[in-house]
Amino acid sequence: MPRISDLSGRPVLGSKGKRRGKVLDVLFHPSEARTVGYVIKPSNILYVVERRPRYVAFEALSFDDEGNGVLSSVGIPSARAGEKAMGLKWEESSYWRGIAVRAEDGDRIGAVQDVIISLKTGAVRGLCVSTGVVGDVAVGRLEVPEDYIIGPKGDAVVLRAGYEELESTGGLAAATGKGAAAAKVHGERAAKKAYDTGVSAAVKVGRSFKQGTGRKMVDTLKKWTADKDEE
């Protein structure tokens, strides 16, 4: 099953094979963990005149074996047709990439970096969660299976598990072969390594890891990875 980042930029063809544009992003239901539609960038008029993005209901676009999006109609259907198919207005749908991820108790875990979806049903099958520049360096991004995903609530996606219960991929901890547990047992050391790495990375992105947001991220990582009897 693809991630929504895999779908971005895919060509969109009409039902008769003529190119109609490309996929820009995926839209999700306001209260359920499922896809409701796609944002399509129509092809330019005479290859010059830009056209505004259009919204297509999930059921109106499928993907062929070559990865092309194929519309169920000759051209891009109207927004009104999409709203009728979805049963809600486009402005009620939402983007998930970049929004906050929280545990049921309200603790912030990170932000959505990517979403795995079913192209058959639109259901969310998993999340890739970023814990920030420092957290990603120390522990890696978190892979969240669908069983842990409750769905969107307010301005965040809510999970049934907290940070410590999720598996991570990449990062310094994963590189040691011990996964997220390594960061918990050796939290101070992981945070220090992340801090040192983050300082050099900060030069490229224009952030300070000695004060402000960068400093808070390091402190948060230490808190997450510290054993309770050490706090």
Image: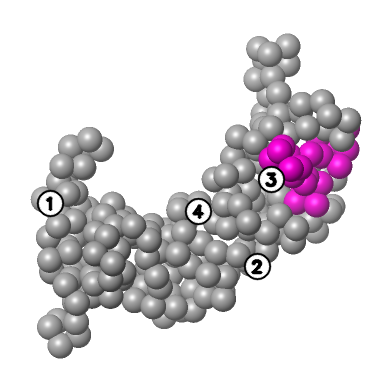
- CB contact under 8 Å: marks 1 and 3: no
Q: In this view, does 49 lie above or below 37?
A: above
Q: Do the residues labelled 3 and 2 touch (CB within 8 Å)?
A: no
From the top left corner, tell me how far across and down residue 145 is, in percent.
53, 70
The N terminus, quarter of image:
bottom right
Q: Looking at the picture, tell me which residue is in the foreground, 163 or 170.
A: 170
Q: What separation in Å lies between label 2 and label 1 (alpha carbons)?
A: 40 Å
Residue 161: tell me if it is visible. yes
Q: Mark 1 points at which residue?
A: 196
Which residue is nearer to you in this view: 46 or 146? 146
Q: Which amino acid does label 4 sit on?
A: Asp
Q: Name the residue under label 2.
A: 32
Q: Quadrant of residue 122?
A: bottom right
Instruction: Point out the stretch of residues depicted in magenta.
Output: 56-77
How much space separates mark 1 and mark 3, taking CA atoms? Answer: 40 Å
| Tag 1 secondary structure | helix
- Quickly name the residue at label 4: 114
* Badge 1 amino acid: Asp
**From what the image shows, is residue 191 above or below residue 210?**
below
Which is nearer the N-term, disc 4 or disc 1? 4
Q: Earlier in the sequence, mark 3 or mark 2?
A: 2
Spatial CA distance of label 4 from label 1 is: 27 Å
Given the image, on which type of amino acid does mark 2 rest? Glu
Mark 3 neighbour class, 10 Å CA radius: few under 14, some 14 to 19, many 20 or more: many
- Rounded to the nearest angstrom, the CA distance separating label 3 from label 2 is 16 Å
Residue 164 drawn at (x, y percent):
34, 76
Q: Residue at x 36, y 73 (%)?
A: 163
As for residue 66 lying within the magenta part, the answer is yes
Q: Which mark is residue 38?
A: 3
Label 2 Cα neighbours within 10 Å, binned few <14 / some 14-19 / many ≥20: some
Mark-to-mark CA distance, 4 and 2: 17 Å
